[in-house]
Image: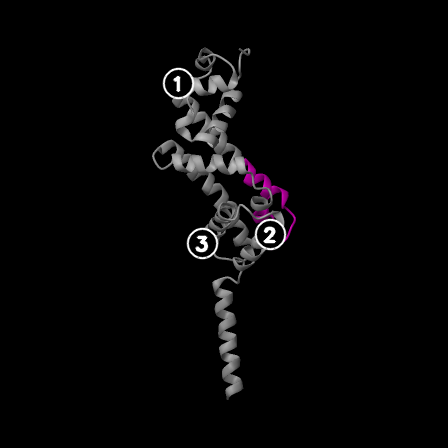
Amino acid sequence: MRGEIDTQAWIEAGLKELASNGVGGVRVEVLAKRLGVTKGGFYRRFKDRRSLLNAVLGEWSRGRISAIHRVREQSEGQAPSERLNSVARHYTERLSVHGMAIELAIRQWARSDSVAATACTSVDEARLNVAGQLYRDLGFSPAESRERAILLYSFLFGQSLLFVEHGPRKFASITDAGTGLLMGLPSDKRRRKQTWRFSAGRERSD
């Protein structure tokens, strides 16, 4: 048996087990065996299994929220369209199979657990807020920015689930195409453009 295991090691072991076998696999005896320690070490760190599960959710949500804010900060100084592309590419070029397995397991767990559902909501809101701000910087209204942020979010994660056989180059091509479509003109500019075309057409016909 190994010596005393710190709290973080238990949480990381919980995340690994979650990715492999879902929340049902995150059991004290399973993690103790994985870490090579007795269950007594667990109870010196956590009150019970639920305490560990809450810590796992906290670790995941804080990590995902910090990640999207880091991506936003790294793109500071770029044009709004370039910043949006940078955010989109981050989630396709650096796709982690292990990270996606954890996310899917937590989202499945959230279907029957209010704490897991709250963690998912906090992560979703952080990601949508960053994307929404980028769309507002492009000239979209708050309502349109929110709509496009949701579409972009759905597109990026749907792509990562459906086209796992694609390599980085193919992912980049799909990401660029999808992001380009989602950066079309805001509705007021589209209306002005359509009005101008209609007026120009009438002038020509007259």
Residue 152: percent from the left, percent from the top? 50, 51
Residue at 46 percent across and 56 percent down: it is: 144
Q: Earlier in the sequence, mark 2 or mark 3?
A: 3
Where, by quadrant of the figure, is residue 147 drawn?
bottom left
Q: Which residue is mark 2?
A: 170
Q: Which mark is residue 2?
A: none
Few, some or many residues within 10 Å of mark 3 (<14, 14–19, 20+) = some
Spatial separation of the CA atoms under disc 1 and disc 3:
41 Å
Spatial separation of the CA atoms under disc 2 and disc 1:
45 Å
Spatial separation of the CA atoms under disc 2 and disc 3:
26 Å
- Magenta range is 66-89
Q: Which amino acid type is shown beneath numbered disc 2? A: Lys
Q: Which residue is mark 1?
A: 48
Q: Which amino acid type is shown beneath numbered disc 1? A: Asp
Q: Which amino acid type is shown beneath numbered disc 3? A: Glu
Residue at 47 percent across and 39 percent down: it is: 123
Few, some or many residues within 10 Å of mark 2 (<14, 14–19, 20+) = some
Q: Earlier in the sequence, mark 2 or mark 1?
A: 1
User: SS class of the residue under badge 2?
Assistant: helix
Residue at 51 percent across and 49 percent down: it is: 159
In this view, the mark in front (2 or 1):
2
Residue located farthest toward the right when viewing the structure as drawn:
77
Residue 52: percent from the left, percent from the top? 43, 22
State if disc 3 and disc 2 touch (CB < 8 Å): no
Q: Is residue 68 magenta?
A: yes
Q: Is residue 133 magenta?
A: no
Q: Which residue is mark 3?
A: 147
Left or right of 196? Residue 74 is right
Residue located farthest toward the bottom when viewing the structure as drawn:
206
